[in-house]
Image (tube, helix red, strand yellow):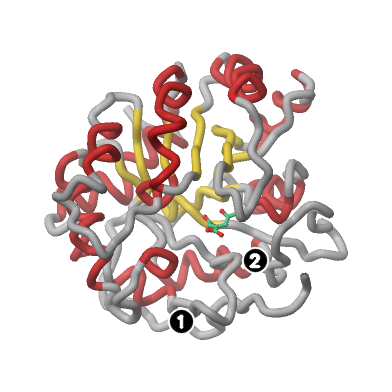
Amino acid sequence: MDAGWLPFHPTPTRPAFTPPSGAVDAHCHVFGPGDRFPYAPERKYTPCDAGAAQLFALRDFLGFSRNVVVQATCHGTDNRAMVDALEQSGGRARGVATVDAGITDGELAALHAAGVRGVRFNYVKRLVEPRPDTYYHGIVERIAALGWHVVVYFEAADLAEKWDFFTSLPTIVVVDHMGRPDLTRSPDGPEFAPFLRFMERDNIWCKVTCPERLSKSGPPTYDDFVPFARTVVERFPDRVLWGTDWPHPNLNMVGHMPDDGWLVDMIPRLAPTPAVRQALLVDNPMRLYWPEEVA
Ligand code: 0GY
């Protein structure tokens, strides 16, 4: 299990695109260091150590102001590395945790105090063992009371099966990576239509993220990703988020490690006007993660 995963790009290109002031990288992770924050025994991959100081250096280098640090499966329900990053951020990072149904009210309150504002339910079978909906319902009732939202990660083919559960959720629901569409199809075709229909619901948001995982046309421009992200951004400009996905966990030798500067330079192609970029990079993530700072 310890061999074969690519390390993050050591020297990304400085992007030509300058994000608007106050931009938020709304999907990234921190990992380890493993000797301080051990990886979960049940993990399906072992990432490279990638700590808060490296994340914040990248944030500054890319021209961003804040991060949303999302718990990934390799740390299971042990949120300590993520919480440590929030605490080191001086209020410039908020988090999405993975919790188990037995979490106490005191533990939830401590996560909230540290800056956690959502929980993530992961349905990607190569990453986790699926749990029944009833398991998640118990968690949702608890976190809804804190004003948190739910982040869901699933494969496009699984949306139909999860539809009733997802649409029953009383909170905002944020979908990772546009629900992993097949980019060899058309964004106007029948394959992507159910996802767009899902997005028609007022409480559903999504992240236009992860060209490096989804693209078949590949780097550096990931052309096949652009029309899908642009379709979503143009139709639902108030409910989209963008993030780097740094340090790009679980990419192995079959894939490639993206240059984070390339990813930033894609943003004007996904969000062609300054107004839409302001929504995608600043106003939407601020509303969701720092609502107390939004008038
Ligand atoms: C991502 C994508 C992946 C991994 C995880 O929680 C995770 O381990 O989300 C993936 O392998 O597609 O968002 O980082």
176 or 87: nearer the viewer: 176
- Name the residue at 40% across, 83% down: 13
Q: Is residue 43 above or below residue 13?
A: above
145 or 5: nearer the viewer: 5
59 or 126: nearer the viewer: 126
Res 23 visible: no
- Name the residue at 77% across, 44% down: 78
- Name the residue at 68% across, 65% down: 51
Q: CA distance from mark 2 to mark 1?
A: 16 Å
Q: Is residue 24 above or below residue 144?
A: below
Ranked by sequence position, the earlier of labels 2 and 1 is 1
Question: Mark 1: few, some, or many residues within 10 Å (few <14, many ≥20)?
Answer: some
Per the image, the residue denoted by label 1 is 12
Image quarter of the C terminus: top left
Q: In the drawing, does residue 4 fall left or right of residue 158?
A: right
Per the image, the residue denoted by label 2 is 53
Q: In the drawing, does residue 90 fall left or right of residue 278?
A: right
Q: Position of residue 191 (x, y in %)?
A: 25, 48
65 or 231: nearer the viewer: 231
Q: Position of residue 249 (x, y in %)?
A: 59, 65
Q: Position of residue 159 (x, y in %)?
A: 40, 37
Q: Say how many tags the image has.
A: 2
Going by the numbered disc 2, the residue's amino acid type is Ala
Q: Position of residue 77 (x, y in %)?
A: 74, 41
Disc 1, SS: loop
